Amino acid sequence: MSLFHEFKKGLWEENPTLVLVLGMCPTLAVSSSMKNGMGMGLATVFVLVGSNLVVSLVRKFVPKKVRIPCYIVIIATFVTIVEMIMQAYAPPSLNSALGIFIPLIVVNCIVLGRAEAFASKNGPIASILDGLGMGLGFTLALMSLGGVREFIAQGTLFEYQVVPNWPPFLLMKFAPGAFVVLGLFLAGMNKIQMRKAAKEGRTFTPPAMLDCSHCRICDLTRED
Amino acid sequence: MKEMLKLSLALGLTCLIAGSILVFAHAETEEAVKAAKLRDKEVALRDVLGDCANQPIKDTKSFDDVTFYFARSADGAITAVAGEAIPKEHKGFGGEMKVLVALNPEGKILSVAVSESKETPGLGTNVTDRKLTKSIWSLFSGAKDQGEAAGLPPNVYLDRYTDQPASKIGAADFTILGRAPTGDENGVQAITGATISSRAVGDAVHQVCAAFTTNQTALLN
């Protein structure tokens, strides 16, 4: 696997939101507008890269049986430091835009999922690229979802009014709209993959080893 | 037994190292965080009180859990007062909120701004954030966005308090309503989908107005 592939896969083939279906909670909550989506996505990229790097560096020292609690401690520490640094040194505009999302990243499955599935088994450079790719894929997914929801709800994109006097459709701004739009996106994604596979003369299956039974986060006692 | 010891040690060591890093990081950034918060407060006060000859952040008095900041003209006379309160009865949705209410010495509300809040972006922030509505065409045509000229950017909810007398908002019968107030009703309409945030801001504004009216003589002298 070339290093570039590690980066590229997070953007489309193994997009964490639309293919791996990880991190659904923050996705549904934060994709209410494009600006929020971008803010959350960029903050997550930073945390993903950092935590992947740290987990990859300590992977030989952490005993297998307590690896999950250790990873959680590492991720939470990293996020807390990022929050402190942002509050202290970031310009007020950046802080007010991203500040609320930082504490939410700790509970984002993507971070723990990638630490367990990838960073704990690969070297630092590959882990950094994986984190970068996954984070950017997450950002793109959030921004597209946010764009659709924001536009249908208010007629704005990135808080710029595109269509004046748009009748507000508040359903899109809240949870029900989030579920509906996300469902349609997932269906669309599968359709595209199926069509592409049919054209290449094979049947489409979701990437192997990525479904729930292979996740292993819930299976703490396994050592392999 | 030996394995359990090894595992506990590994986990304990991770937590110890993480904890030490956090303590160190906190100590290093504590001063900078305080300075940043002070700077934000100064900006908020300047937005709400306008230009003045003194430094409102240092010119304060407290009454009934409300901190008042004074804006004075060059001869020391009070031009405006800003009261800052934390909602007590109706707390903010996401956590602690601090609301600044600017009043003139006659007891009329000049403006309301939220200096600290953690409300949900896109929902609660419709109540707390003041911003200009931007049109995408203005990006292309380079035209001025609406409302760029005068003072504070607009906010539908917060502007409902402007020009109201503090004696009215501070009265015991002030409530937050789900619709526009009719006749003599003492209330302000909330924002759909942000009722809790609206109530929290209303609670804080009510506190400031009540404290102002009760202590008006002591404040202005």
Image (spheres, rainbow, N blue to C red):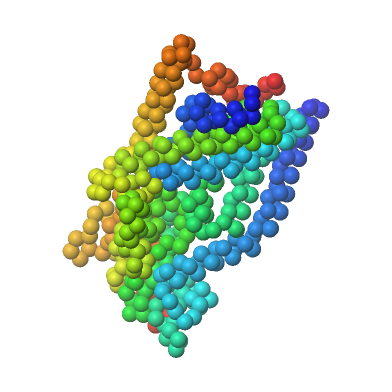
Residue A210: quadrant of the picture: top right
Quadrant into which the C terminus of chain B falls: bottom left
- Determine whether B7 is above or below A164 in the image: above
Q: Is residue B64 left or right of residue B34?
A: left
Nearest to the observer: residue A3 or residue B202 = A3
Residue A193: quadrant of the picture: top left
Residue B130 seen in render:
yes
x 50%, y 69%: residue = B42
Q: Is residue A6 left or right of residue A32?
A: right
- Determine whether A106 is above or below A8 in the image: below
Nearest to the observer: residue A44 or residue A12 = A12
Q: Is residue B144 left or right of residue B47?
A: left
Q: Tell which residue pokes out farthest to the front in this image.
A: B141
Quadrant into which the N terminus of chain B falls: top right
Q: Position of residue A123 (x, y in %)?
A: 70, 31
Q: Position of residue B51 (x, y in %)?
A: 43, 76
x 47%, y 82%: residue = B53
Q: Position of residue A135 (x, y in %)?
A: 55, 37
x 42%, y 25%: residue = A189
Q: Tell which residue pokes out farthest to the right in this image.
A: B2
Q: Tell which residue pokes out farthest to the left in this image.
A: B183
x 22%, y 60%: residue = B181
- Determine whether A207 is above or below A133 in the image: above
Q: Position of residue B61 (x, y in %)?
A: 49, 76
Q: Is residue A169 left or right of residue A212?
A: left
Residue A29 seen in render:
no
